Image (tube, coloured by chain):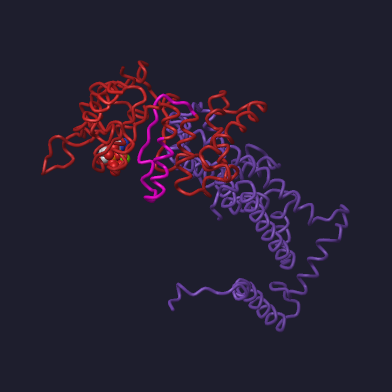
Chain colours: A purple, B red
Amino acid sequence: MRWINRKPGALLATVLATLPFLAVLLVYMIGSDMRLAVNPQDKLLPAPTTILATAERLLTEPDRRSGEILFWNDTFASLRRLALGVLIAATTALITGIGIGMLPYLRKSFAPFVSVVSMVPPLAILPVLFILLGLGEVSKVALIVIGITPFLIRDMSQRVIDLPSEQFVKAQTLGASSTAIALHVVLPQVLPRLIAAVRLSLGPAWLFLIAAEAIASDQGLGYRIFLVRRYLAMDVILTYVVWITLLAFLLDLALRLLSRRAFPWDGEAL
Amino acid sequence: MSYVTIKGLSKTYGKRTIIENIDVSVPKGQFVSIVGASGCGKTTFLRLLLAQEQPTRGEIHIDGAPMAREPGRDHGIVFQRYSVLPHQTVLNNLIAPRAFRSSFWGRLSRADRAEERAKARATLARIGLEHVADQYPADLSGGMLQRLAIAQALAGEPKILLLDEPFGALDPGTKIVMHDFLQELRDQSGMTIFMITHDLGEAFKLGDRVWAFDKPVWDATDPEKNAATITYDFDARDDGIPFQTLKERTHVLHAR
Ligand SMILES: Nc1ncnc2c1ncn2[C@@H]1O[C@H](COP(=O)(O)OP(=O)(O)OP(=O)(O)O)[C@@H](O)[C@H]1O
Ligand SMILES: [Mg+2]
């Protein structure tokens, strides 16, 4: 039988899925063991047990100076910035995307503009944001918004244009106004696409968040990682990295479930 | 009495004239079947009737009204695909026409919605889609989808109904069921219908009149050169032999 036609069973599929994770863990453990054997004080590749101990300390022990658990403060601060940025970007993109996709006048004047703006590297204008908006929360949220909105707008307007023209004609013959078409034909059909696009842009959103936090902040996951970097605290960094990865994964999963739940007519499972 | 009047109609895309010199008039309640080779401009003609596009020359008047500039409530349309709203249930698809025209926002008031739901359920029962009322179009078979699409178009109470190969994707058995369905709806509503089809049998079976679109002059070196027009306008009532039966029937009537 050809390899393209061979499929693993359920059990084997699970084993295959866990295999790469185990392999990475194994490679890490071997590397860590080798370094620690030569120098027990080595900080670069701490043993998994050390990381677990550090994680436990980070998650439960309050900071001596403030009395608060910094880990949770950092998580809360970062998630708030991320959520705010993504929410603003998604709302903006939904409205402008539908406008550009539906109205020829808007399309003619804004589509080229958006595609040029989307070429601006967001990180390159981060200093501008800091200068204009200060070092507070606004500039960090703004970076996320600026970073992902152009992509979302382009995706949304393309999705609107891709809707079969038959549906627009049909709605018109049934007496729908432009507003009614936007609300009842276009909006419900691009919402699942918006969620899909937001899922894709979560990666860049995290990137912009951590970059902004690394440069100027006093709390946040990115801030902490770049702070402890000075002491080569790999155990702390790795704990935070695993935590960020888990958060990102859960966010993605939540959006996927939401999409499936809210749009049962939408067969596409991404 | 002419209900749909078409005068000197032609449509040109760039340098290519697709159809030209179309002069016809159709009385109210007539069923016109449109046949012709692929790419000869049948859909283009329908788009002009629908006011989805404007003619290069000529005029179209429905019920004496001025020419339409965009698709509107006078026009009912069923395409081969994508005719219903995929994100609404079967029941809501049938309510959509009332909701759309009820207000600027396209939403029914709570009280109206209950009433329209009841009406729509009755319609669904009549067209045999009651059992799938709360399902989405993706779950329906091709025949059921087209039944829904036709019912939805008629719920908009248009002046003319336009069908572009509505049964083109259906198997022969389903097609025959759909013919009965369409004929029944037509008898009830007295709708003026234009239907494009590639099935000649279907065209003559359903139509009162069959138009054949073709190019009167063929250019062998450039098949895209000349425009198409209505080359034949058959009377298709009584299986295409109205003349003979008409006489006999009158005769029989008088004898009784
Ligand atoms: N918007 C357009 N711009 C340029 N040419 C077009 C456009 N729309 C249609 N045409 C051309 O007009 C011709 C007629 O197309 P039309 O769709 O009306 O044919 P048809 O008779 O419906 O064919 P079919 O039976 O395959 O559906 C085609 O050659 C097509 O390429
Ligand atoms: Mg066609």
**Picture layout, residue B138 above or below residue B79:** below
Q: Position of residue B227 (x, y in %)?
A: 19, 34
Q: Give the residue drawn at x 29%, y 38%.
A: B204
Inspect this view and state whether residue A147 appears.
Answer: no
- Rendered image quadrant of residue B192: top left
Inspect this view and state whether residue B69 appears.
Answer: yes
Numbered range of the magenta stretch: B156-183
Q: Front-most of A175 and A190?
A: A175
- Rendered image quadrant of residue A135: top right
Q: Position of residue B108 (x, y in %)?
A: 61, 27
Q: Left or right of B87: which side holds B65?
A: left
**Image quadrant in which the C terminus of chain B is located:** top left
Q: Where is residue B200 in the image (x, y as percent from the top left)?
A: 27, 42
**Picture layout, residue A147 above or below residue B95:** below
Q: Give the residue drawn at x 21%, y 30%.
A: B244
Q: Left or right of A43: which side holds B79?
A: left
